[in-house]
Image (spheres, helix red, strand yellow):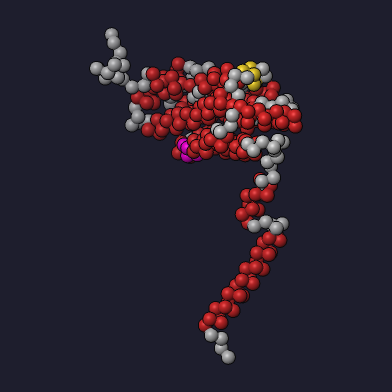
Amino acid sequence: MNPTPAAALATSATSATSATSATSATSDHGAAGHTPYSAWLQTDALHSLQRPVSDHPGEYGFIIAAQVSELYWMLIIRDLQAAQGHLRAADLGAALGALQRAIAHHVPLNATWRSIAWMTPNDLLAILSRVGEAHGKDTALQGWTYRHMVYLLGIKQREHLQHFVPQPGRWAMLNDALSAPSLYDDVLAYLSRAGLAIPGALLDRDLAEPYVPHRQVEQAWRDIYANPGGNAGLVRLGETLADLAEAFTDWKYRHLMATRRTFGTRPAYFGTEGIAWLKPTLDELPFPELWSARSVIGEPPPGCPHHARG
């Protein structure tokens, strides 16, 4: 007897379910019991990495916020390095795409501060006191991912290497990053190849030393912006770098304000009061001549209060 359409559908559905179950079982077996989602994202490992040492309800959130920041810093590092590679290959479009990704990563990165903005000094001190007992004295200066990103942005400070002596592998990696070209070094080399007057001494200097702004580089940026039609790509590069520097500085400002709210003027970094340590970092702008050139880009028309007077 031929089955009814309903029976046929039921039989087909049963067969499909059996086949799907068999396939799933095979997939699960092959992935050691994981679904494809959890195998790909390693969710079991990810959710095993939060190990509070206190019973404070905010510690878990503090750990998560810090771990998320670490992941975004690595994303930014990867895209800054990609931008450097594209600039060296004279592919400005691809370099701009990588830089725009790095800027976009700062949006969720900077938003992580909201997760712990509710904390008072009582909350933070209750957590940090237990962290110190469990792991020893800590400082944010020991974050190697952040330091690598800062070196890539051109803020080269050799003294920070001392904080990584307990991690010889990371010390060596950061020492290499200190001596390697920063993103801005690659930008200046790209501008030089494009015909801008970039001093050769800047391109051949000791890259591990702090960058010293140069008047000729400021003039090069002024020349770029003086002809926005003919230099559209370079103007876009300048504005993208400005966006990146703003996003980076926004994170530093939020760090400063979080310190004000939860720590006040207590000694923090090796005996130095935390706010006093952090405030000067707001002036450590990447790509310095791109900013100083803003004072000389453009000609104020007559009648403008900024018009030069003879």
In the image shown, does 58 or 14 lie closer to the viewer? 58
Q: Quadrant of residue 181?
A: top right
**Magenta span main SS:** helix
| Magenta stretch encompasses residue 212 | no
In the image shown, does 230 or 171 lie closer to the viewer? 171
- Quadrant containing the N terminus in the rendered view: bottom right
Q: Give the residues drawn in magenta, as a range.
A: 96-101
Q: Is residue 266 above or below residue 79?
A: above
User: Residue 234, how many percent across, how many down?
Assistant: 41, 31
From where the camera sits, is residue 184 visible? Answer: no
- Quadrant containing the C terminus in the rendered view: top left
Q: Quadrant of residue 223?
A: top left
Q: Is residue 260 left or right of residue 144?
A: left
Q: Residue at x 65, y 49 (%)?
A: 43
Q: Residue at x 57, y 34 (%)?
A: 116
User: Residue 100, how many percent across, how many down?
Assistant: 47, 37
Q: Is residue 267 left or right of residue 241?
A: right
From where the camera sits, is residue 107 visible? Answer: yes
Q: Is residue 65 above or below residue 153?
A: below
User: Residue 138, how many percent across, how many down?
Assistant: 69, 27
Q: Quadrant of residue 269?
A: top right
In the image shown, does 162 or 186 lie closer to the viewer? 162
User: Residue 189, how many percent across, how many down?
Assistant: 50, 27
